[in-house]
Amino acid sequence: MNDRAASAVEAPSRALPFRIDPVSRRVSIDAKDPAFFQDPYPVFEAIRAVAPVFFWEEQGVWCFLGADDVNALYRDRRFGREILHVATREELGIPEIPAHLKPFYDVDGLSMLEREPPVHTRLRTLVNRAFVSRQIERLRPRIAALCHELIDGFEAKGEVDLIEAYATPIPITVIAEILGVPVERAPDLLAWSHAMVGMYQLGRTREMEEAAVAATIAFSAFLRAYVEERRGKPGDDLISQLIAAEEKGEKLSEDELITTCILLLNAGHEATVHALGNGVRAILRSGADPKALFATDESTAATVEECLRYDPPLHMFMRYALEDLEFGGIPLKKGQQVGLLLGAANRDPNRYPSADRFDPAREALAHVSFGLGIHFCIGAPLARLEMQVAMPILFERLKGLSFASAPSYRDAYHFHGLDGLQLQWDV
């Protein structure tokens, strides 16, 4: 930290891995310290007590902890996911993309997650026309059958890593079947997805970057072959529907189509894997009775929403200031990024009484785990359905479910998910 921080407030007695200067609101957080990534919530609560808005030095951005601020930032049209549609790199001092990363950003830059209107509006409308029209609810029987098939394969063992054996295969199988790509290629899809998602981690290495680029090239080539096949022989799958989707004479270009499929595959399983694992962990730690939690459709839905609020899979979402402005008393220059701290906002005690307690019976208040506004997660209905089906079946089938060993989280911030979840049950 700078010289001014010599008098900075030390982290509380729990030796939390941060330092804060309460005057400047500059904060240093060691995100690679297990004391942070294993449980970031106490860190953010300690910071919130001093400064609900702070400058995270290692990230170089102003960060917002409060639920009201995060809600407003999602919807405020003075902020966006891209900046080069309103300014040049030269104007903002943004360096050119390094040559070795160009293949990744050529694909990523076409993603609706990274675009603003009117381009985003066009992409989202076309994808909605294909994706939402599939009536996600009709997938419920297939998801239930898949859950039972997976449990049949390990029930007699009495112990399993739930992430590997259950939480991972459910969403990757479902999204592969929806798109119409072979489920047998799931290991490749997972490897490509993990490598690409690594680009969004804090402290990524050159090795991670090169792996992401290689995965992007391989993933794109794989999908391009299926797109070409579906053009000549359409089927009852999402790729065929994306090809056919049209709005006011507009269709997705082939590159946009491939990027959309990659986005759906990556987002369609990565977050759900972590949400399932984190949710099961939360239920087991709470000591709540699973029978009561999943007694009705209403209680099941409430339990899933509380899982998503209590320990979400994504903890930070970045947006650009599209003009010079002030927000929350912080002056921001055009092109400056801000960090929306989703996990912290979901634990805001001003919004959620006893926010650190897992309580599916609490008054239903919207969380921010799926985002808000125009970038609200397009896969949210599918993720919710997968959790609403998979969790009750798991607890119904495996009586006496408990931890076989203490679960630990991956060092992968901004993401928050378990390395593994070793569970045991009565056999």
Image (spheres, grey):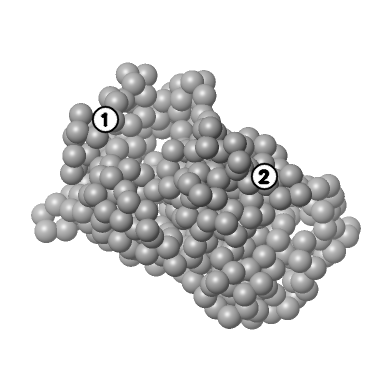
Quadrant holding the C terminus: bottom right
Query: Which residue appears at 18% of the width and 53% of the height?
Result: 118
Mark pair 1, 2: CA separation: 34 Å
x, y percentage for residue 73?
37, 59
Residue 41 picture quarter: bottom right
Residue toward you, 412 or 76:
76
Residue 351 picture quarter: bottom right
x, y percentage for residue 258?
32, 39
Q: Residue furthest right?
A: 427
Q: Amino acid at mark 2?
A: Glu
Look at mark 1 in the image and give the residue it sits on: 93
Look at mark 2 in the image and give the residue it sits on: 10
Q: Amino acid at mark 1?
A: Gly
Asked if residue 59 shows in the view, the reply is yes
Badge 2: residue crowd in 10 Å (few <14, some 14–19, many ≥20): few
Q: Nearer the viewer, mark 1 or mark 2?
A: 2
Whether residue 231 is situated above or below residue 214 in the rendered picture: below
x, y percentage for residue 143?
56, 60
Residue toward you, 231 or 30:
30
**Pointers 1 and 2 in contact (C-beta within 8 Å):** no
Quadrant holding the N terminus: top right
The local secondary structure at tag 2 comes to strand
x, y percentage for residue 173?
53, 49
- First in sequence: mark 1 vs mark 2: 2
